[in-house]
Image: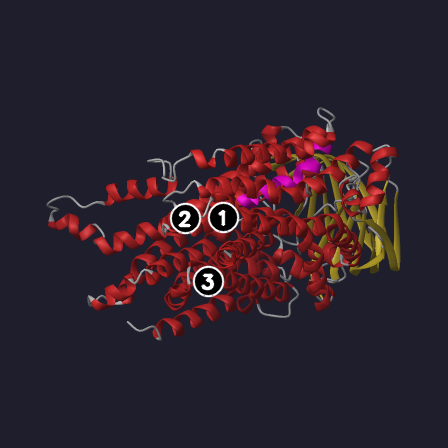
Amino acid sequence: MRILHRYLRREIAANAGVGLLLFTFVIFMQDLGRALEAAVRANSWAIVQLFAYVLPAALVFTLPMAVLVGILIGLGRLSVDHELTAMGACGVSARRIMRPLLELSAFALALSLVFTLWLAPLASRRLSALTARLATAEAAASVQPRVFFRPAGNPNWIVYVGSTSAGGRLWQHVLVADVRAAGAPQLTLADSGTLLRRGPRRVQLHLNQGAQYQIDAAHPGTSLVSSFHSIDIPFLLPPLPAGTPALAAEPLGALWQRSRFAPDWRAARVEFYRRFALAFASLALALLGIALGLRGGRGGKAGGFVLTLMLVLAYYLIFILGLGLAKQGRIPPFWGAWGANLIFLACGVWALTRLDRVPHRPIEGADPVAWIRAALSRRAAPAASPSRLRRLWTPSLLEGYVIREFLGYTGLLLAAFLILTLVFTLFELIGSILQNHIGVGLVLEYLFYFSPQLLYMTIPVAILVGVLLTFGLMSKANEITALKASGVSVYRLLVPVITVAGALCALQFGLDATWLPALNQRQNELHARIKGQPPQSYHDPEHKWVFGRQNDIYYFTFFDPGRQEFADISVFNFNPVTFTLTRQIFARRARWDSTVPGWVFTNGWVRAYAHGAAASYQPFLVSTFAGLSEQPSYFATDARQGSQMTYTQLRNYIAALRRSGYDASRLSITLAKKIAYPLITVVMALLAFPFALSVGRRGTVAGVAVGVLVAIVYWSTASLLQALGNLNQLPALVAAWTPDALFFGAGLYLLLRVPT
């Protein structure tokens, strides 16, 4: 019996380990690039610290899922191979089979308790300190040259940076506008500036060689210009969500005291119960997984994976809903945090009590994977006497078989990644949703607009693991050997996979060239609303800042593209060398006159500056000014980030920046990756094929583990190179294309060494 228990533990633990690696990687994949860039700006040790402090909180979330997927996949494999039936025939009862599974679940429970009660709060406190140290680097990393932005902690300021250097820490041609006075922004222009850390949530913008321009909106004839050699402007970093980080970082004893006596006792008590409930999720999901797995079925590992997704989605939705209701005071904190566990524990215990009464045979049509495969097989079955034209356009039996298997696993993985990331995103946003009173409709809208970007990002990983699963299982079943014995080259098996990978690559190109930029813009806006953050200036419907083609900056409160008319417009003309103000135009209205052609300003004034002081002031009723060549179409669209523009739009934007002599290296990397990233989908298929043939006989678990490790190496390499490129330490093309070249070379080398 010890041998049997050891065999079951090894089977379940192997699948659970691979599931834990896969789920944790998918969660980390979203923020990997931003975290690496912020850490690289500081030092390499910060990278290790960053991941070490984030890992415990992620493992608390993914460990119960790993236990569930290990049990369902392991028992599913035993059921398909009729090993459960053989155990039953030898007199091994279900209770004996349950014992090692419950031991593994208890071990996962103990590990989760260590993480959630001790390591996660400790890591949260350390992460807060590290984030404060990296705050300056993150603030600098958020700055994009030639894009006006509104600092999240300073809603009344607009900041503009002409270019950056020294890894983003040194800014050239800096403009800071105080827009508290409508129609009369107070400007600070400087030749250079840098961000300095001055304490928690506080950084200081140190400016050199500039001047401040102040105008009284009620008396525009008076102005004050003050030059400076250096000046410091305090910045506030974005505030953290109220209560959440402090509660997450509290030690258990202090949290319990806070839940009894503090004004925010309800939120503290919900957090207290949440920590225990998340740990016991391993046991709750494991009991139900054992009951479902011992019933038997023909779904195998794929069926266990599908069932895991369904159960995880149901559990965490109930869990998140319970936390939300508890924090709102609609239900007691205990029931809100423990409701999902109690429901799943009750279902698991009930299913286990009825386990011996249920026959160990699958219900016909109950396995979703088998049903899908059967439907695809019927649909792809050739006609009795196909015509010559049909044979030309229809894949052969072998190619159809490979495509069906490959698409099945790839689609399953894409669905898994999508569901997992959306659930984790919802779990992270629940505090902001409740704090800012966000409706369900807005949350669902955000998740809807967020899904295409997730699909775009996870296709290469799904392709990689899908190829490894497909050909790994074929190799293990000796199907590859049979094909070789029949004179079929293994290269023929690669053709349909490369074709499907090429189609998905084209899908990525199509998404990025059509809908994805607009969807990204919308999901960023919705995310800002959920977080309670003010919109950035180029999304602000009340105030707009636009950089002209020459040396002008336009600031207006409203622009009507139909009537081609501005309201309350200011035009700032500056010296491109010294970045000092030379002229300011203000008008209540300005309209485009095609007969001039040019802008006609009404009810305003113009002021000239020379040698750091006001030189002249002239009011006017109607006037035109030379040098303002921007036509109405120039102001019809807002400036956007690289991910919010198509390839053509971004290329034209970069060309305009370079014509003006500004650094566009960060955007150049984004432009190159718009081609390089979709192509990695085909490269991953090419690389995974020889890996699958070499590790296939070691089992599916080994294949998936290899796939996840390869994906981790690729994403870490790509993110690190992009971070170095953003710091101007690598050329844009090298930073964007090196991962593709390295992995393509490795895949081609391994492919040529495969015996055909």
C-beta proximity under 8 Å, tags 1 and 2 = yes
Separation of residues labelled 3 and 1 (CA atoms) = 24 Å
Q: Which residue is mark 3?
A: 702
Report if residue 200 lies within the magenta region.
no
Q: Is residue 306 left or right of residue 626?
A: left
Q: Write down the region rendered in magenta.
A: 420-435
**Magenta span includes 427:** yes
- Give the residue type at disc 2: Leu
Q: CA distance from mark 3 to mark 2?
A: 23 Å
Left or right, 58 with respect to 496, comes to: right
Using a 10 Å C-alpha cutoff, classify the residue at mark 3 as few (fewer than 14 neighbours), some (14 to 19) or many (20 or more): many
Q: Earlier in the sequence, mark 1 or mark 2?
A: 2
Find residue 683 and report its horizontal and vertical position in percent: 42, 63
Q: Residues within 10 Å of mark 1 (few under 14, many from 20)?
A: many
Q: Nearer the viewer, residue 704 or 284?
A: 284
* Amino acid type, label 3: Ala
* Residue 540 visible (yes or no): no
Residue ID for mark 2: 84
- Which numbered disc flags the more N-terminal residue, 3 or 2? 2
Residue receiving disc 1: 97
Give the SS element for disc 3: helix
Name the amino acid type tagged 1. Answer: Ile
Quarter of image, res 196: bottom right
Answer yes or no: do the residues labelled 3 and 1 have beta carbons within 8 Å?
no
Q: Main secondary structure of the magenta part?
A: helix
Give the vertical position of 162 relative to 268 (above or below).
below
